[in-house]
Image (cartoon, helix red, strand yellow):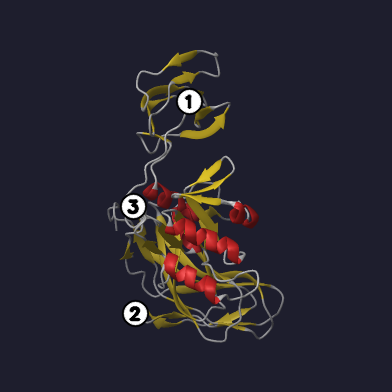
């Protein structure tokens, strides 16, 4: 949906409607600028019970004003005045959920906390993908086993459920015995269609994302004094302590070359972080710094793997700030081929890289020891 479609959409109860399309959750990915008419539509949608999820940025500007005081008033009402992550609800059941960029991977969890799924498996880990379309006056669900192993389980459908199933491999069609709970067996990469005259409307759930955001920080074991790793054309020293933070001011000795600096926290015994959502990173940047580099974090594992995570926190934003790096957003780096094994974390490196600055430029960063981020339903393994 673009800004024009948003302006043309109508608010229908707790939904946005545009032609035959209807949405009950609106996700704003790093969207801080929209026409004023669009922001008013988003606000009215939220006031009527809709859910708005802002990721990486909050409403700030209109087509004529940057910043726009009117847009900022809307932002505070929908998302609150505190630093994300945050949840604000209203009497109509609307929810405004603000997530920092480093929590992008939580977006599906937020949606699941607000609305039940149209269709889902009893086993949340099942490799079954399900989509729904409205075709020829019927709602059609398509379920596929996205794995090379056979799967046997139950699929739940919202509302009044479905009436029949079609096997695309054989063309066989049959009625279902239970419209809302359908036993299903699929071979490797097998698929099945389900059809109903009218799909049910997923129930709105009461927790409005607040439970999903009920997270706590868990200090990691003491890594001792960290070390710094830096590029050839970077001069830097490390000072400080764990309580006040480790400061690593760096001077670039050559301009317009790829530079980097990371503060490394090594662990003598590999950490098991598999029971956590991600990392919490507290850093500070001095006033006046103009470095546009992003705060990055690397995870090193016992098998030699290296994985890169981005935080959305930039080093030209002065002051102390908390950033997040969820494990679902880490990607294999360099020659690493294996998936990230969170049970064997041997080091966490926090800093900046890929920066082409000017000779003599200073990049000043203070880093606190990383912490683990745990959800309300997760158990500590540290």
Determine the image quadrant of residue 153.
top left
Q: Quadrant of the C terminus?
A: bottom left
288 relative position to 74: left or right = right
Tell which of 40 and 116 is nearer to you: 40
Mark 3 / mark 1, whichever is N-terminal: 1
Can you tell which of label 3 and label 1 is closer to the viewer?
A: 1
Q: Tell me if residue 334 can be seen.
A: no
| Label 1 residue SS | loop
Q: Identify residue for label 3.
A: 275
Can you tell which of label 1 and label 2 is closer to the viewer?
A: 1
Q: Tell me if residue 349 can be seen.
A: yes
| Label 2 residue SS | loop
Q: Identify residue for label 1.
A: 197
Badge 2 vs badge 3, beta-carbon distance below 8 Å: no
- Alpha-carbon distance for marks 1 and 2? 62 Å
Q: Identify residue for label 2.
A: 243
Residue 111: give x, y in percent of width and height. Answer: 43, 49
Mark 2 / mark 3, whichever is N-terminal: 2
Tell which of 81 and 249 is nearer to you: 81
């Amino acid at each position: 949906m673009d800004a024009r479609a948003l302006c043309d959409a109508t608010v229908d109860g707790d939904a946005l409607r545009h032609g035959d399309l209807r949405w009950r959750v609106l996700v704003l990915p790093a969207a801080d600028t929209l026409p004023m008419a669009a922001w008013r539509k988003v606000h009215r949608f939220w006031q009527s019970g809709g859910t708005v999820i802002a990721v990486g940025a909050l409403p700030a500007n209109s087509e004529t004003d940057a910043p726009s005081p009117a847009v900022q008033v809307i932002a505070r009402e929908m998302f609150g005045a505190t630093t994300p992550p945050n949840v604000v609800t209203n009497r109509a059941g609307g929810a405004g959920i603000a997530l920092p960029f480093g929590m992008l991977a939580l977006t599906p969890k937020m949606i699941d906390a607000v609305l039940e799924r149209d269709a889902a498996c009893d086993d949340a880990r099942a490799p079954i993908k399900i989509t729904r379309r409205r075709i020829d006056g019927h709602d059609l669900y398509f379920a596929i086993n996205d794995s090379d192993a056979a799967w046997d389980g139950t699929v739940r459908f919202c509302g009044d459920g479905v009436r029949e199933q079609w096997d695309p491999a054989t063309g066989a069609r049959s009625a279902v015995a239970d419209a809302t709970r359908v036993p299903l067996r699929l071979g490797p990469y097998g698929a099945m269609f389900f059809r109903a005259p009218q799909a049910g409307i997923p129930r709105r759930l009461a927790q409005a994302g607040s439970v999903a955001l009920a997270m706590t920080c868990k200090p990691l074991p003491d890594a001792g004094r960290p070390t710094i790793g830096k590029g050839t054309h970077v001069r830097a020293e490390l000072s400080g302590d764990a309580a006040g933070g480790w400061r690593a001011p760096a001077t670039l000795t050559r301009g317009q070359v790829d530079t980097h600096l990371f503060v490394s926290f090594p662990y003598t015994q590999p950490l098991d972080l598999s029971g956590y959502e991600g990392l919490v990173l507290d850093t500070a940047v001095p006033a006046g710094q103009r470095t546009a580099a992003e705060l990055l974090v690397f995870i090193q594992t016992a098998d030699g793997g290296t994985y890169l995570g981005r935080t959305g926190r930039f080093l030209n934003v002065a002051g102390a700030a908390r950033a997040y790096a969820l494990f679902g957003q880490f990607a294999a780096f360099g020659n690493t081929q294996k998936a990230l094994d969170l049970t064997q974390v041997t080091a966490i490196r926090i800093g900046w890289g890929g920066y082409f600055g000017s000779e003599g430029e200073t990049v000043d960063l203070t880093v606190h020891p990383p912490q683990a981020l745990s959800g309300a339903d997760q158990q500590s393994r540290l």
